[in-house]
Image (cartoon, rainbow, N blue to C red):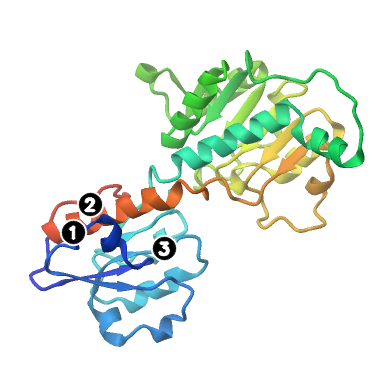
Amino acid sequence: MPPKPETAAGVLLPWADLDARHGPWPSGVRVQVWDGLTPEDRLPADVLESTDLWVMPYAVPGVERLLPRLPSLRAVQSLSAGVEKLLPWIPEGVSLHNGRGLHDASTAEHALGLILAAQRELPRWAADQRAGRWEPHFTRSLADSRVAVVGYGSIGQALERRLLACEAEVLRVARRARPEEDVHPVDELPRLLPRVDVVVLVLPETPATQGLFGKEELAALPDGALVVNVGRGRTLETEALLAEVRTGRLRAALDVTDPEPLPGGHPLRQQPGVLLTPHVAGGSAAFRPRAERLIVEQVRRYAAGTPLVNAVPLS
């Protein structure tokens, strides 16, 4: 992190009045607000020229276009956990910080909701309600199921806590083995997958993870297994998944897809064993208060010359 500037720190935030809710800004901090929805051309030149720390608006497409117009920029705070698409935009000498931890609870509970909805056939019961049907039968359960969490980071850990509360067994999988935490490496998936009931992908999109879960991995799953994706759509091969769910051999519950948004006529939408949500796992009411606390902490750290948290390696 660059040392504290001798002049007033220019901070550009996506939301106003954070000081009214969290206490006054440190002396020497000049805060400006840009929500990403107002055209950037309306930002005064002096704001662009003096911004040292930029907290980017969340879930606003294209805001990275402002980066080349901030000549004094020293640090960028994203409110997203995954920042892979930002990396090419970060100027040399500027530090990047992600929103690690902000989406853990929201994403984990959404993943749990998808699993429970699929296992207990909630879409079917909702359709029966509308149609006036009353046709009860036994369903699958999450209790006593074996769930592989592929991408065992902070979100995966939050999901594990919820799965264990539902009496499921959890297999932890990450890029590399972590024997001290009982975490398996991804290259053990061919051995692990034949004995799981549910696999949950919580993966970032990187060159190593694109298409990581494809035809061979899906084929290794037992009949009736559920594939859940709350990470990035391109980590799961869409055509390979479609081939499996069309036959009814596998089921899927997806918050992210490839392509995204998923076209209205895409065949995945028509499969009875597929449940879709439109990339909303991280967007619950729990996000905003946590994001505000992170922003305030980062601004105070920056003003004090203290290293910011959640630094992303850029080399």
Residue located at (50% from left, 42% from top)? 106
Of mark 1 and mark 3, the one earlier in the sequence is 3
Residue located at (86% from left, 33% from top)? 247
Q: Position of residue 315 (x, y in %)?
A: 31, 52
89 to the left or right of 223: left
Residue located at (56% from left, 45% from top)? 281
Inspect the image, locate mark 2, and give the three-letter code of the amino acid beneath it.
Leu
Residue at mark 2 to residue at mark 3: CA–CA distance: 21 Å
Taking depth in this image into account, of 98 and 109 the one nearest to the observer is 109
- How crowded pointer 1 is (Cα within 10 Å; few <14, some 14-19, many 20+) is rated as many
Q: Which mark is residue 302?
A: 1
- Choose top left, top right, bottom left or bottom right for residue 181: top left
Q: Secondary structure at mark 1?
A: helix
Q: Which residue is mark 3?
A: 88
Of mark 2 and mark 3, the one earlier in the sequence is 3
Residue located at (47% from left, 24% from top)? 161
- Choose top left, top right, bottom left or bottom right for residue 198: top right
From where the camera sits, is residue 135 visible? yes
From where the camera sits, is residue 175 visible? no
